Image (cartoon, grey):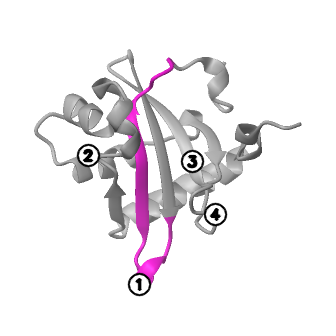
Amino acid sequence: MSDERTERTRIESKLEIQSYIQNLNYALIHGAAITFQAERQVDCSRDLRYTNRFTVANLFMNENPVDVLKRELQKLTVEEYMRTVKDLRFPKRSEMREFGKVYHEKDDVYIKIRVELLAACGKHTVFVMSFHYAVIPFTKDMFPYRSK
C-alpha cells in the first residue's frame, strides 16, 4: 500500500527545475499576473505566524505584497527547490513546485507556486499558494540539490 502523499509528489531533475525557474522569470519579466492567496481557509485554524499575510507583512513591512513576491520569486534558485506536487483539487492544472528560502539567516520560509505560460486569455500567470514561515524547520535532506 502506497502513501497518498508520496504518490502526489516527486523530485524533478536539476535541469527540469532550471527550466522551470527560467519559465518563472520569463513570465515575471513579461508581465505575468501574480495571484497571491493572502487569506486561505487553512489559516483559520493555524497560528497567525504561519500565514501568508503575516509572513509577507513581517518580512517586508510597508511594501506592496505583489511587488515583493515578484522580486523574491525572481531570486529563487535550484538549491532552494524541495519537490513538485500534483494539485489534487485541480488535476488539469499544472503541478506546483515547493521551495524553501531562509531570510535573516534564521527564518525558514516555505514557498509553493504554479507558473502557467500563456494560460487564460494569453496571459502568463504565477499563482502563489504559500509564502509563509515554515511550520517545520528546514533540514538539508529536504533539498535535493542543495550543496552538502
| In this rendering, position of residue 28 left or right of residue 6 | left
Q: Which residues are magenta?
A: 116-137
Residue at the far right: name it. Answer: 1
Image spot of residue 126 (x, y percent): 42, 60
Vertical side of 100 occupied by 91: above or below = below
Residue at the far left: name it. Answer: 62
Discs 4/1, front: 4
Whichever of labels 2 and 1 marks the residue nearer the N terminus, that label is 2
Q: Which mark is residue 68?
A: 2
In whole angstroms, how far apart are the C-alphas of marks 2 and 1?
25 Å
Picture quarter with the N terminus: top right
Disc 1 residue type?
A: Cys
Residue assigned mark 1: 121
Disc 2 residue type?
A: Val
Residue assigned mark 4: 91
Marks 4,2: beta carbons within 8 A: no
Image spot of residue 40 (x, y percent): 35, 46
Image spot of residue 74 (x, y percent): 40, 49
Image spot of residue 84 (x, y percent): 64, 46
Query: Residue at 22% across / 47% down in the picture?
Result: 65
Whichever of labels 4 and 1 marks the residue nearer the N terminus, that label is 4
How many marks can you see?
4
Q: Nearer the viewer, residue 148 or 138?
A: 138
As for residue 132 lying within the magenta part, the answer is yes
Query: Residue at 10% across / 39% down in the picture?
Result: 62
Q: Which mark is residue 53?
A: none
| In this rendering, position of residue 68 left or right of residue 64 | right
Discs 4/2, front: 4
In whole angstroms, how far apart are the C-alphas of marks 2 and 3?
19 Å
In whole angstroms, how far apart are the C-alphas of marks 1 and 3?
23 Å
